[in-house]
Amino acid sequence: MKIAKIILPVLALLVSSLVRAQETATIQLELPATFFNQVCPAPVWQNLSVAWQGTVDRREQASVGLESKKNGKDPIAVNTDPPIADLIDGKLREIFTRCGMHLVADAPEVPLKLGASIEAFYAGVRRVSFSARARRRA
């Protein structure tokens, strides 16, 4: 009976820590509305046909960062919605199309093949809190 009194609280702590470890936060990443016009104001590739091979996420973890809710304690993984590979794939397709490329499925008659791989990606947030005293000085 004494063993059960000791084991049950330990198991409860382990289960709660496992649940906390699996907790995640989700963010949405966006590009500014003027991004595409800044990158490619005019089509530079005159309807160049390219076999698009897609974007592959080669990172070990799917998260793009960590967030802590209690002053640096208990960090949780931060993921993106949609997944980062889908987001980057769609934006690259849009950039290349706006810049004058004609993206086609992988075909033997198209000599130029293009794709992307994500090796590392980290989204960081710098939070600064101001006290009433600091606001008065500013």
Image (tube, helix red, strand yellow):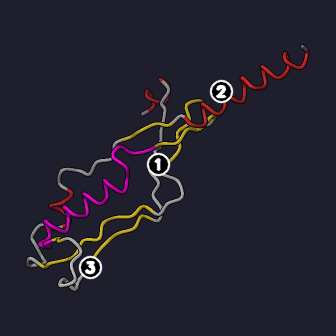
Q: Position of residue 77 (x, y in %)?
A: 52, 42
Tell me the amino acid under the disc marked 2: Ser
Q: Which picture quadrant has residue 50?
A: bottom left
Q: Which picture quadrant has residue 74?
A: top right
Q: Position of residue 80 (x, y in %)?
A: 39, 45
Tell me the amino acid under the disc marked 1: Gly
Q: Tags 3 and 2 in contact by the CB under 8 Å rule?
A: no
In percent of the image, x 60 and y 31: which residue is there? Answer: 19
Q: CA distance from mark 1 to mark 3?
A: 33 Å
From the viewer's perspective, tell me whether residue 70 is left or right of residue 126: right
Tell me the amino acid under the disc marked 3: Lys
Q: Label 3, secondary structure: give it.
A: strand
For the record, the magenta segment spans: 79-102
Instruction: Please name whichever residue, 2 or 82, is drawn nearer the observer in this view of the structure.
Output: 2
Circle 1 is placed at which residue position? 124
The quadrant of the picture occupied by the N terminus is top right
Q: CA distance from mark 1 to mark 2?
A: 27 Å
Task: Indicate whether residue 120 is drawn in magenta.
Answer: no
From the viewer's perspective, tell me whether residue 51 is left or right of residue 45: right
Circle 3 is placed at which residue position? 113
Q: First in sequence: mark 3 or mark 2?
A: 2
From the viewer's perspective, tell me whether residue 18 is left or right of residue 66: right
- Furthest-top residue in this view: 1
From the viewer's perspective, tell me whether residue 63 is left or right of residue 11: left
Circle 2 is placed at which residue position? 16
Residue neighbourhood size for the residue with mark 3, other residues' Cα within 10 Å, grouped as few (<14), some (14–19), many (≥20): some
